[in-house]
Image: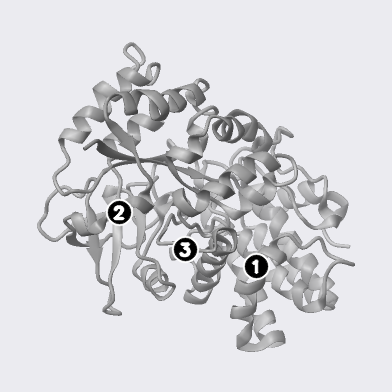
Amino acid sequence: MPEKIVLAGHYYNPLRESNHSRFKGICTDPQGLDWTGIIAEQSYTPQARKGVFKKTSFDFQGALECALADKYPETVAEIRVNMATRGVADAYIHPLLPDLSRVDKQIVIGAGIKRFFDITGKNPRFIWLPEAAVDTETLEVLIKNGIEGFICAPNQVVLNDGSDPNNVPTRIKPPSGETILALTYDQALSHKLAFEDDKDHPLRDDAYKFRDLVIRPALDRLRNGFPLMGYTDGETFGHHMQWGGDFIDTLINRALPEAGIEPISINEIDFNKVTIAEGRIWDRSAWSCLHGDLARWHGKCDCCGGAEVGWKEPFNKAFNFLNDRITKIIEGELGSSYIEKMIANFDQAFKNPGPPATTPELSLISSKVSALTALTSCATFFGDPHVSGRINILHARVAVEHLKDAGLPNRARALWSTFLSSMEQVWDPTNPGKTGRDMTEKLLRDRSYC
């Protein structure tokens, strides 16, 4: 029998533009570049044409599909047609789930699961969480939604017997008493797929060499019936790694099959033939920061290479305040049923262009969806707020615009005024004397509030 391998990609880019008609044309990139389009041309579309989505597993976030649907319909169609067999669910948008309230976790996770079902007609078995960030409460919400397992890094799991958690499916039992699987990928394989360690003796310049020097030794380490699993960003192949489209094409379509190694979907794994370990998660851990407590996004670690990151705490505080205030407004207007309404209408609300194609209720839901989108984790992933922070600012402003569309102009204006005051506490590490308010008003110009 052939040996098995799961090669998987996390396909995500934040929604860099607004779907609201009054904010069309605002570019959030500091250099005016359409990064989503650039990466689509370099990575997503070539991979779709080469059949990568037929041989790998993947999550493909709702926000990214929304950005690609009109310009790249064939690429999106290829992804959708393979999602039922090869795909795993995602959270639709990209806030750090451990930083959200339980209700917001329910909304974001529920929306992602609904999208998967709407596309495939099936309930997803597994899920990729934003930044793979997880805490116990998130696990309880996943279990409540029927998710069997989540993908994560080995550093996010501790096995009860103290052994290495690499590539080991692990049963986690939160306080609710029910269980869920943590599916850890192989760290060495995933790292070498994503990064080139040795510039003098590169491994990613030849798929056959990569197979023999990286994948074969990793297969020899397997011990529990679980196939070898590598997970990396989807944009690795073609964007980060310019020749990567040819590399992954050759690897999955020729190099591996010729060696009797079969690329399978994560959904094909027979867990009746797999030894499941027992363990626990590191609460508030993520795949792209090893310091714990989501430190990278809160300015409490050196992941940003010594950059001045004290701006992150007040930045997060401003956007969390906006989301919390809009939550209270929508609760007051729609009652407790707003949670179910948000999950049911999340996709429509995310794409809502505003009047005349809206209703007061949909505008309220859209306001909350935009407020959650304004918590996108990319802003505080980097060393300064200019790289991606404008994305969050744009969606915060759109959240307020939807409030106005819902017939609450005075509350919208007051909320925006308070938000701007909060942004005055955010300093710009690249421009002394400038604040987050300056950054906000520069981006929005005459549309700051009208």
Disc 3/disc 2 C-alpha distance (Å): 18 Å
Q: Quadrant of the N terminus?
A: top left
Residue at left offset 25%, top offset 57%: 271
Q: Which mark is residue 346?
A: 1
Nearest to the eye among marks 3 and 2: give it.
Answer: 2
Q: Amino acid at mark 3?
A: Leu
Query: Can you say whether 30 is above or below 266 in the image?
Result: above
Query: Can you say whether 103 is above or below 113 in the image?
Result: below
Q: Position of residue 380 (x, y in %)?
A: 53, 49
Q: Position of residue 82 (x, y in %)?
A: 52, 47
Disc 1 and disc 3 in contact, CB within 8 angstroms:
no
In the image, 110: left or right of 282? right
Which residue is tagged 3? 97
Q: Residues within 10 Å of mark 1 (few under 14, many from 20)?
A: many
- The colour scheme of the drawn protein is one colour
Q: Residues within 10 Å of mark 3 (few under 14, many from 20)?
A: many
Earlier sequence position, callout 3 versus callout 2: 3
Quarter of the view holding residue 354: bottom right
Residue extending farthest to the front is: 1
Q: Amino acid at mark 1?
A: Phe
Which residue is tagged 2? 183
Q: Position of residue 252 (x, y in %)?
A: 40, 30
In the image, 219: left or right of 378? left
Quarter of the view holding residue 227: top left
Camera-nearest residue between 187 and 98: 187
Q: Quadrant of the C terminus?
A: bottom right
